[in-house]
Amino acid sequence: MNNQLIKNWNHTNQYMNNIKKSKKIPLVCKICGAPAYYSYVSVIVCFSCKMFFKRNAETKQDHSKCLFDGHCDINIFNRHNCSSCRLNKCFQSGMQIEMLRSSRTTKNKTRRTNRMTKISTVLAKLKDIDQIQQLPTSNLLQSNQSTLSIDDWNLLSNLTRCYDEYNEFSIIQHFLCEQNNLPPKMRYKLSRINELFLSFINRSQYFYENNTHFISLCSHDRYILIHNTMKYVGGLSACFITRHTGLLDNLAFYKSIEIIYGSNTLNNSYRIINQLNFDSTFFQLILALLMFSTFDYTYYKNNASLNLLDMKSILRIQNIYAELAWRYLICKYNYGQAVINFSNLIRCLFSLNDTIVEAIELEQCKDMGDLVVEQNKKTITLL
């Protein structure tokens, strides 16, 4: 009994499907004569002619020309040969651009609305990220939203967080309060000033430790980068903090520095300070670039030189920060100002290298650098 019901059910389904198929009687396309099953913009056309009219009605009617002065007889076999005559036949058959335009306008309007909604959503997320992470560049979104991606903003936020932990303004404030509480003859002594600059360089360790790109490298490459670049990162940071705190405007401090490090080193440092006319976010990107820089001054030593093991990864990281710095400048300023800032950066790095080469000849500076590297050996192995 059940088998009979199943057979009857299958037979009924097959019969209904045959009825449905039989109802689809093919018509003739008025353009090329191919089988057609529906009308498009009030004209019975095949699918091929429908798509042809949709693509070409507005865009190509003024540009296409017939090679036979408009005498082509369009059919299913030659409809692809002459788009001009095929399009003219579409118009002669009653197809109208106005009917096409109304449907396309609605679709374009829908796409435009969806696009604006997506942009608004992204902007809202970017603003939330900016407020939560307290980036000092909250006005960048108003100038050019398309330059920086969400990943770029996250990377900038991480740099800012690292720099906040490594912030040296508190060191300067503590140093000045301490010196002001001392008698005039006890202020700005050699040992205390050396400790101040040693803390500048040593504190840059936090900037390395909290950088995910740096942590991803092997311990061998981390050691070499710290050994080669910490003097640049620490030295440039000291100049940047000195510029913004006006520490060299203190005559007693200026004279003490001149006695300790010499007038040439001080003048070179002063030149670097005057060149650091950068905002804090771009300066943080500069420090990140210096962290992964492979340039170093050349000097002779007894120890054998060490080479980086994964140079490709380091160069890739360099490109990440260099491109981000460029996009940031374009976003906040404009193309011309971005070029000026990068030009000033290159000039500043040359000045920094000259100053370090000269300062390393001083015994106290060399000992200071060696001490910092030795102190950071344990930290490198634990990362």
Image: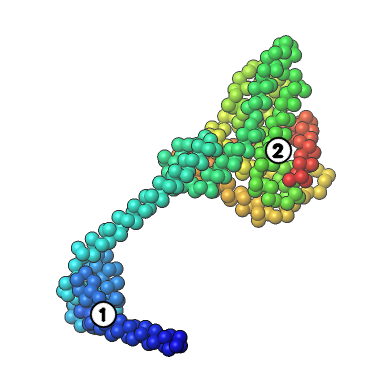
Is residue 379 among the parts visible in the rendering?
Answer: yes
* Residue pictured at 68% horizontal, 22% vertical: 174
Residue 331 pos. (x, y %): 46, 43
- Disc number for residue 205: 2
The Cα–Cα distance between marks 2 and 1, rounded to whole angstroms, is: 75 Å
Q: Measured from the top left, where is residue 380 in percent x and y?
A: 75, 44
Residue underneath mark 1 = 36
Q: Tell me the SS state at disc 1.
A: strand
- Decide which of 43, 360 is in the foreground and name it: 43
Assign the N terminus to one quadrant of the image: bottom left
Task: Name the element at disc 2.
Answer: helix
Residue 173 location, quadrant: top right
Q: Give the residue drawn at x 50%, y 39%.
A: 130
Label 2, residues with CA under 10 Å away: few <14, some 14-19, many ≥20: many
- Amino acid tagged 2: Gln
Residue at (65% x, 34% y) in the render: 166
- The kind of residue on which mark 1 rests is Ala
Position of 262 with respect to 37 (left or right) is right
User: From the viewer's perspective, is 4 left or right of 91?
Assistant: right
For this rendering, which residue is in front, 171 or 121?
A: 121
> Seen in the image, is 301 located left or right of residue 345?
right
Quarter placement of the C terminus:
top right
Number of numbered callouts drawn: 2
